């Protein structure tokens, strides 16, 4: 399988952030993001992990009752990124 350039990974990461901005404050599973962007779930997961290290997204591993998910995680945009996107949209 051919490798994907950093530039293309950055563009796909931007698409992930924009999608999470559109559905904010909803918490989305990786499978939903992958389906929306027509990408592989493992690839999306790797990109989300990179975005998590940069504090751009938040990983949610518990349900509403506080029970830890055994296999799945939900993701959402961090508050600082959401406010930055919102300020950009206003201008």
Image (spheres, rainbow, N blue to C red):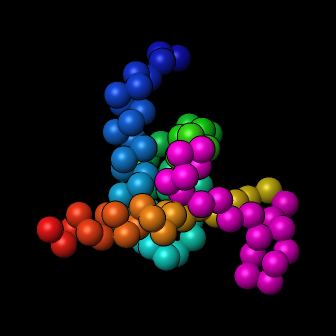
Q: Quadrant of residue 82?
A: bottom left
Quadrant holding the C terminus: bottom left
Q: Residue drawn at (77%, 70%), measured in percent from left and top? A: 62
**47 is higher (above) or lower (below) than 18:** above
Magenta region, mostly helix, strand or loop? loop
Furthest-left residue in this view: 91
**Is 66 contained in the magenta span?**
yes
Query: Residue 27 location in percent, x, y?
Result: 57, 70
Q: Which residues are magenta?
A: 52-70
Residue drawn at the location 43% of the way across and 52% of the way down: 16
x then y, percent, for residue 47: 53, 41
Residue 18's image quarter?
Answer: bottom left
- Observer able to see residue 3: yes
Q: Is residue 83 above or below residue 8?
A: below
> In this figure, what is the number of numbered marks?
0
What residue is rendered at 56% in x and 40% in y?
Answer: 50
Residue 32 on the magenta segment: no
């Amino acid at each position: 399988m051919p490798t994907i350039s950093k530039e293309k990974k950055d563009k796909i990461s931007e698409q992930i952030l924009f999608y999470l901005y559109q559905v904010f404050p909803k918490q989305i599973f990786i499978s939903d993001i992958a389906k929306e962007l027509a990408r592989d779930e493992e690839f999306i997961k790797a990109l989300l992990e990179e975005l998590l290290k940069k504090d751009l997204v938040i990983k949610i591993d518990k349900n509403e009752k506080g029970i830890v998910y055994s296999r799945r995680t939900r993701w959402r945009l961090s508050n600082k990124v959401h406010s930055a996107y919102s300020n950009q949209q206003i201008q």
